[in-house]
Amino acid sequence: MSKVFGLALGILAAVGGFVDIGDLVFNVSAGAMFGYELLWVIPIGVVGIIVFSEMCGRVAAVSKKAVFDAVRERVGFKAALGTLIASEVVNLMTFAAELGGVAIALQLLSGLPYRWLIVLAALGLGVVIWVTSFDWIERIFGYGGLCLLVFAVAAVKMSPDWGEAGAGLVPHVPQSNAMVYAYFVVGLLGAAMTPYEVYFYSSGAVEEEWTPKDLGLNRANAIIGYGLGGFFSIALMLTGATLFLGRGIEPEHLGTIALGAEVPLGEIGLVLAIVGILFAVGGASIDTVFSGAYNLAQFCGWEWGRYRTNARAPRFTLTWIVLLALGILIVLTGVDAVVLTEYAVIFSVVALPLTYLPILLVANDDAYMGRYRNGRLANVLGFVYLVVILVVALSAIPLMILTNVGQG
Amino acid sequence: MTEIDIALKVLDHQILDCEGRRCGNVDDVEIEGGPGEHARGSTILVGAGWWPQRAGWIGRVARWLAGNERVRVPWEEVADVEAGVILRKTAGELGLGRGDDRVRAWIEKIPGAHR
Amino acid sequence: MRTLSSLQGRKVVTESGESLGSLYDLRGELGARTLRVTGLVAGTRGFLEHLGITRRSATVIPWDDVVRIEGKRIVVRDQKS
C-alpha cells in the first residue's frame, strides 16, 4: 500500500515538475500564433521524453552508469569532450533562462526590482540546494508546480472549440506560414525533450542505486508523470489559443502568460498561475544547474552526488556553485528571458542527438545490459525518435534564422 | 586469467579506490614493451594533463579549464577490472583525487558543508 | 613510452603490404597483478562500427606477430587466413 502511495507522490512531483520555461514560452506562443493546429506535437514530445528517459533509467539501473559515463566510454574521447562542452553551454543557457523566469515570477508577486531579484533568486536557490535534502526539494518544487493546474481549469472555462482542438491533435500541415509552423514544431519538441531532465533523471537513478527490480516502479513513475505533465502543455497551448490568437497578442512576457489564468478566473487565477510558474521554473533551474555539475563530474571521474554531503563531493559542489554564479551574470546582462529561452531550447535541440545516440547504443549493448537490452518495442521507438531528433536538430538553426526566431 | 579488450574495458572507465571513492577516469594506459618483447599495460594515466595527447587542441582548452593534473598509477595497484578499475589502496595513497582534496578545504569553510 | 590512445587509429599492414585495417584496441590478459598485452584488435572501422551499430569485423593479431611500430602504422607478419 505504501508503495502505491509513494508512487502516487512521485508522480505528482513529476507532473508538477514537468513544465519549465521552455514549455511555458513555446506552448503559449504556439497557441497564440496557430491556435489548436500544433496540439499534435505535444504527445509526440511527451512520448519522446518518455522513451529517452526510460532508456537512461534502464541503463542506470543495469549498468550503474549515468549518461556521461556512457558517453565517454562509448563514443571516443574527442567526440565525448565535444559533447560535454556542447552540453555544458546548453545547460548554462537553459539555467539562465529558468533563473530569469524565477526572477520575473518573483517580480510579479512582489513588485521588487528585477535585477535585485535575479541575485536574490539565485542566492535563494543556492541556499535551498545547500541546506535542503533532495527529496524535499523535489517535493516542494513538484507540488508547488501543481498550481499550474489553474491553466487547465482556465482553459476549460474559456470554452475552447473542442472539435477544432480535437482536429489539432491530428498531425497536419499548416494552411499558411509553413516556416514559422515548422519552427514551432521544432521548438515544442525541444521544450518537451529537454536533455537536462534526462541527465538529472539518469544521475538520480545511479545515486539511488536502482537495480533492475526497481525498473517497473520507476518506469511507471516516468510514464505516468510525464504523460500527465503533457496535459499541462496542452492546457498552456489552449490558453494561448483561446485568449491570444487573433488578437495580435504575443506572449512575450511571463506576465502575459499568467494573464491566461486571470481572464477566466480572476485574481486568484493570476496568483496561482504565478506561483505555479515560480515553482515549476524554480525546480527546473535546480535540475539544470545540477545537470551541468553531473555531466562535468561524470566526464572527469570526480566524486559526485546530491546525496553525498557537500564536502564529500567538493569539485561537484564547486561546479554547481560556479554555474549558479555564471547564470546570474548572464541574466544580469539584461538579455530578455523569453528570447534567452528560445535560444536555449533551439540549441538544446541541436545538441540532443549527441547524447541521445550514445544512450540508444548503450541500451542495445549486450555487454552493458545483458538481458535488459532494448527489446523490439524499445528499439522501434528508439530508432524512430532518433530520426525525429536528427531531423529536428538539423533543421533547428536554419529555421531559427529563416523565421527570425519565430517572428516570421 | 581473464581476456579483456583494453580500450573497451579499461580506457575511459571510472576508477574507484579501495574505499569505493571515485577518483578519476582512466585517461590513458601506458604500454611497455615493443615488438618481439613481452608487452604489458604498465601504468594508468589519470588527469586532464593527459588530454591533449588524445584530443589535440580541444584537449588543450579542456586541460586549461580542468587543471593540469598528471598522475601515474602503476598497474600493480589495480585490484580488479569490472564495472570500473578498482584499486588496492586509497586515492590519497596513490596521489589521486587531489583536486577534490584541494577544493574540499574551501568548501568546508561554508557552514553546513557536512550535512 | 607508448600509450594505448597513441596506438589507436594506426594502420596495421603486413610485411607483404596487405592492409588489415586500423588498430582500435589491444587484447590483453588480466592476471593478479599484471595486464599482459596479447594481441592487436584491428579492422576496418566504419562510422557505424565505431558506434557499435553493426558488428565489428575485427581481426585479432597476436602480439608476437608484430614486427615493428612506426609513426603512422604497425607492421605485422603475414597472417595465415
Image: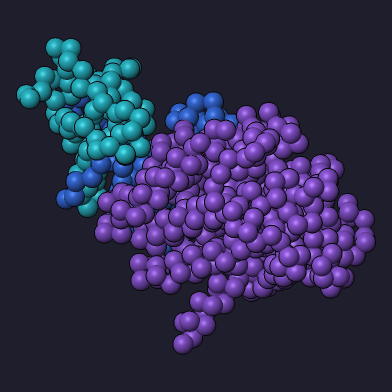
Report how many numbered discs are placed on residues in the image. Answer: 0
Q: Residue at x 15, y 31 (%)?
A: C62
Q: Residue at x 84, y 64 (%)?
A: A263
Question: Which is nearer the eye, A258 or A237?
Answer: A237
In the rendered structure, the colour chosen for chain B is blue
Q: Is residue A104 visible?
A: no
Say which quarter of the image contains residue A120. bottom right
Q: Position of residue A73 (x, y in %)?
A: 39, 44
Q: Position of residue B108 (x, y in %)?
A: 67, 63
Residue at far top of view:
C16
Say which quarter of the image contains residue C39. top left
Q: Residue at x 74, y 33 (%)?
A: A408
Chain in purple on the image: A
Chain in cyan on the image: C
Question: Which is nearer the eye, A301 or A30?
Answer: A30
In the displayed structure, A403 sits above or below A27; it is above
Direction from residue C31 to residue C6 in the image, left or right: right
